[in-house]
Structures are given as C-alpha cells and as structure tokens.
Amino acid sequence: MTTIAMPNIPFRYPAPIEREIEQLATLFAQTPALTDYPARWLAIQALEGDEALLAEIEAGGDSRVKAALAASLERLRAVYGDEIDIVMVDQRYRFVHDIAIRAVTRPATPPATLSDRIDRIVTHRWLGIPIFLVVMWLVFKLTTDVAAPFVDWLDRVLSGPVSRWVSGLLHLVGAGGGWFEALLIDGVLAGVGGVLAFVPVLLTLYFALALLEDSGYMARAAFVMDRVMRLFGLHGKSFLPMIVGFGCSVPAIYATRTLDSRRDRILTGLLVPFMSCSARLPVYVLITMIFFPQYAGHVIFALYLIGIATAVGVGALLRGLLFRQQPATPFVLELPPYRLPAPGNIWRQMWERTSAFVRKAGTIILTASIVVWLLLAIPVGGEGQFANTPVEQSAFAGLARATTPVFAPLGFGNWESSGALVTGLIAKEVVVGTLTQVYTGGEAAADDTAAMTLSEDLVLIVGDFGAAVGEALRALVGMVGFEIGAALEEPVTTGLAAAIQVGLATSSNGHGELAALAFLVFVLLYTPCVATLAASRHEFGLRWMLVSLVGQFVIAWLAALLVFQGGLALGIRLPL
Amino acid sequence: MLYQILAILEQAEEPLSLDELSRRLHVEPGALNEMIAFWVRKGRLRDSAVVGCGEKAGCSCNANPQGCPFRHNGPRLITLCD
C-alpha cells in the first residue's frame, strides 16, 4: 500500500486578526459555559458574526467576554476599514487560491471553445454591431416575406368562407339580415379577424426571437450594444429590458427591476416603449404591403432601427437634462455557450406568445371592435338608421373628425386613420382592426363568391393554403439570393388596401406614400398602450407615466411631421 | 481575492463576460460564482439571477397565471451596488 505524504500548509490569518483570535480564544477557554466548543474556532465564528453562536456567547459569557469581543471587532475595523467577516473570508479565498495556483497545472492559454471562437467575431469591437444589424434585418425579412402569403391566405379565409359560413348559419337560425349579423361580420369578424390574420407574422417573429434567445445570441446583442449605449452616456445593461420590449413593453417595463438605481430604472422605463413591440407589427405589415410591397422588409427593418435610434437619442437627452451625474457602471454578463436551439423550447415560446396574442384578440381587441362597431352603427346626421348608416355619418366618424386637425399636418388627417390611431391607445393591434372596420364597413360579407358551397369553400381554403406555402418557400429561397418564379411582393389589391390608399392619398393631397411612411413612424413612436402605461405607473408612479404618455405623443408627432413635411419640402416621391 | 472582483468591476471600461473575469482572476468559474454569491449576500453586488422578477413584479396575471410569455430569460447580469 502506497502512502502519499500530504504537504502541511498551515493557514494563518494576518497578524492583527490572529492577535484578536488568540486573545478571544484564551478568554473563551476560561469561560465555563463556552468550553463545549474549540476556543479558536469559536473565536473565529464570533469575529465572523455567526448569529447562533453570538447568542450563546451572549447567554453564557460574562460582561468581560462581550466587552472583549466588541473591542476586538472595533480594533479590526479600524485596521481593515470593512466588515471583519469579509476580510476573513477573503483571506481564506487567497489561501485556497495560492494553493490552487501552486498545485494545479494549467495551460498558459486555455483552449478556446467553439463559443469562444464564435464570440471573437460576434462580439468583436467593430464587427459586432454590423452583425447585430444583419441578424435583425434577417429577422424582419423573414417576418414579412415568409409570413406575408399566409397573412393573405388567412385574410381571404376570414373575409370569405368564414364570413359566409357565419352569415349562412345566422340565416339558418332566422337571425340573418339584421344588426346582429352586421355586428358579427362587420364588427367581430372584421375587427378581430382583421387582427388575427396577422398571426402568421407574429408566429414568424416569435420563432426568430426564440431562435436568437435559445441559441445564446440575445445575450451577445446586449454585450455588443453596450458600446453604442455608452457613446450616448447610457448603460448597456439598459438594453436588456429593451430587447424584451421587442416582444411586449409590459414585461420590459418590469424587467427594469434588474437595474440598480431608481434613476436608471425610470430612464430605461421611459425608453422601452420606443422599442417596437410585436403588437405594432401587424400595422407595419398592413401598411407596408399596401404602399411599399417591394420594400416591406426593408421599411419594417428601418422602423425598428428608428425605434432604437430614438430610444438612444431620447435617452442621451434625458440623461443630460434630468439624470445628470450618473456615471455608467460596468457590469459582468454571463454569456451562455452557444447551442443548437431545442425545437421543444422554440415551439413552447412561439405557442405561449402567440396564444397570448390570440387571447388578447378574444378579450381586449374583441371589446374594442364591438365598441367601434357600435359607434359606426350609430347614425349622427343623415338619413341612416342604427346598423344601417354610411360610415362617414356614424358617431365614430363624428368623434374621429374631432381629432383630425391634430394629424392633418402629418399627412394622415382623414377621420379613418385618426380614429384608428386613437383606438390604438387600447392596444396597437386595434389600429388594424379599426382600419378594417371603417374601410370595409358593411362590405365584409359581400364576397363575389357568395354562392359557393361548403365543399367548394374547403377546396378553395386548401388550395389557397398550398399556394401560400409555395409562395413562402419561394420567398425563403429568395432571401438567400435566388429568385424563383414570379415576383413575390406584388401590391396588395384588396378593397381594404385600395380604400386605405385612397384615404391617405386624399388626406395628403396625393402624397399617399409619404403620408403612409409618416403614419408608420407615428405608430412606432406614439403613446404606448394602456397596459404599458399601467405598468409604467405601477413601477415609476403617476408623474413618470404622464411623462411617457405626453412625451411619446409629442415625439411621435414631431417625427411624423419631419417625415411628411420634410419629404414634401425636399420633393421626395416614394417609393424612391 | 474577493476584493479583486470589486476592483476589476470598478475599473472596467466595458462589460465583462463571466469567463473573462474568471480568466483575469485565474479562478475557476465555479469558485468565481461562489465569490459572487458571497458579495451578493453582503449587498455589494447585484445578480439578476437572484433579483429576478421580484415579488409583485407583474410577471403573472389573470390571463397568464404561469407567468408572462414575453418575460425574457435574459442573460445573467452582475453589477456593483451603489
């Protein structure tokens, strides 16, 4: 049997601490009530503030012991200027570290893992930002190009066969032809269905975000963005809640809790709503596919960049004006190793987030759609009757007209757009629902294939879906540089698209595209939804919530004004 | 050793990864995590993995009792406390 002789390396605290330990140990050894414990060990525990043992010392020791302990602690604090337990723990770590350094042989340069090698490029000082931008561009190209055919398909299904089935069913039970049918088809199906048609877009976005999160890239994005943020005097760590804001502003507001100071939390909370949340995406897709079909992905990507740039710019301004003398503090970030995303995780995230959106459609958006329908059904002036009045003579139009002067300088001062923006304060997706309701009016069910049978409808749905899959695949291949088949991004030519085009062209004196761009910028930046405002009030108080409410509206108004009036002044014709 | 962590953080010009900090201190990541946990207990460092959403953070609601689906399991962030 071999015996290994272990080197004897005694551990000693620095002299001032050892002196105090010895004094206390001697005293404890002379105290009968404390002799159950090894005296040196008890002295160390007492100096480190072990509460249970201190209670025993308090109970068993006399006043001499208590006074000696207090005096020891006082003397050591004077020497080290810090809590003594920290000093002692630090000494033990030093001791262990010294042994490890002497005993463990490590390679001079640790072998680089695959994650290390990827990080050398992805978090590179100069390459990191361009790579981040390319990743974002790919996300939004995927979101628009690949999802668009499915949006069209779902829209056709909801406005065609589903509307016909609902109408047919109502006639079957003798409830057709009246206001109830109008409510279901023009209110619920047009409003909620108009929003639900964008589920494929959100599914694709959530897929892309889940891919980035699960692969470990999102952590690197915050790491990389720190440099940009610091250029403007902001904290890189503020970018983490902002990344959450790409999904939804509400959890992003709560995510500011991970920041240290209240000022940082407020500042970041004010910037989070500038990050374009997923609820705005249906509005972008609708408008860009109508006005900029060939550049939809680029326009949406640009909108997200404008959101980030505005957040950074406003942040720098606020830090200069309201949050001075707040030096940026460095941080340590745990960069998880890169890994292949797990399909189960991806699916779970897509499912949870999309089902939250669908639930929202069944509650908030449904309620908003019914309220909008009611306001559209109530006649004010004219000869119309309830649920049978021209939309321009409805209560909704009357109310919306009161807000049009605010939006007129921005190029979208028509009551339809103004009314949609106001309802968008409830939830941003409601903008799409309202536009669908006010523009399609009573025409939602009026389909030119009204005479189709159920089996013909089913064949049409399946056939259309096949065509959508084909288009999406072509778009996917097109993203990597191969164009297959016909051009994918053709202008949307539905009644809704034509009506929105005419509406914005009229309100902007023939500069519909410029007005559409200003409208998109306004939607990107304007007052967050009520849920976000409530979260903001909960976290930062009423005053900062009002700053967010008013401030964002003003910023959005000015930005949209700059786009529209600036574009007019420069004679810009879109698409370029 | 413990004080070196705070010193490196105070002097850092840009964010550090946990691996980088581990390399600078010549300490295994496991041991470094213990040291960070000690500083978090002493209130000198803040660890997002410990802070999390916090109580009453609104991470769950009636619509999402299991927690907000948009809650991002972001990277762990360690910062100096004021």
Image: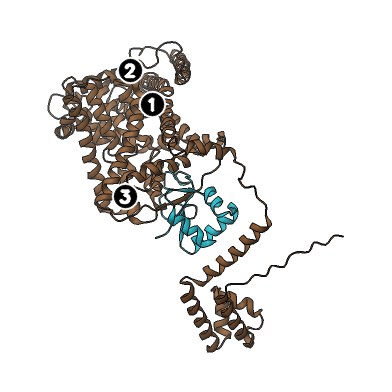
Chain colours: A brown, B cyan
Residue A7 x %, y %: 73, 65
- Residue A361, above or below A573: below
Inspect the image, locate mark 1, and give the three-letter code of the amino acid beneath it.
Answer: Ala
Mark toward the viewer: 3 or 2 = 3
Between A85 and A102, the residue placed more toward the observer is A102
Residue that appears at 55% across and 88% down = A62
Inspect the image, locate mark 3, and give the three-letter code of the amino acid beneath it.
Answer: Leu
* Label 1 with label 3: CB-CB less than 8 Å: no
* Label 3 with label 2: CB-CB less than 8 Å: no
Residue A498 x %, y %: 26, 18
Check disc 3: other Cα within 10 Å, few if <14, some if 14-19, many if 20+: many
Check disc 2: other Cα within 10 Å, few if <14, some if 14-19, many if 20+: some
Left or right side of A383 for A292? right
Judging by the rendered image, the residue that carries numbered circle 3 is A267
Residue A393 x %, y %: 16, 26
Inspect the image, locate mark 2, and give the three-letter code of the amino acid beneath it.
Answer: Val
**Residue at mark 3 to residue at mark 2: CA–CA distance:** 40 Å
Chain designation of label 1: A
Which residue is at the far front?
A108
**Quarter of image, res A5:** bottom right
- Residue A117, above or below A460: below
**Residue at mark 1 to residue at mark 3: CA–CA distance:** 35 Å
Judging by the rendered image, the residue that carries numbered circle 1 is A197
- Residue B79, above or below A289: below
Q: Earlier in the sequence, mark 1 or mark 3?
A: 1
- Residue A131, above or below A324: above
Judging by the rendered image, the residue that carries numbered circle 2 is A492
Secondary-structure class at tag 2: loop
**Quarter of image, res A53:** bottom right
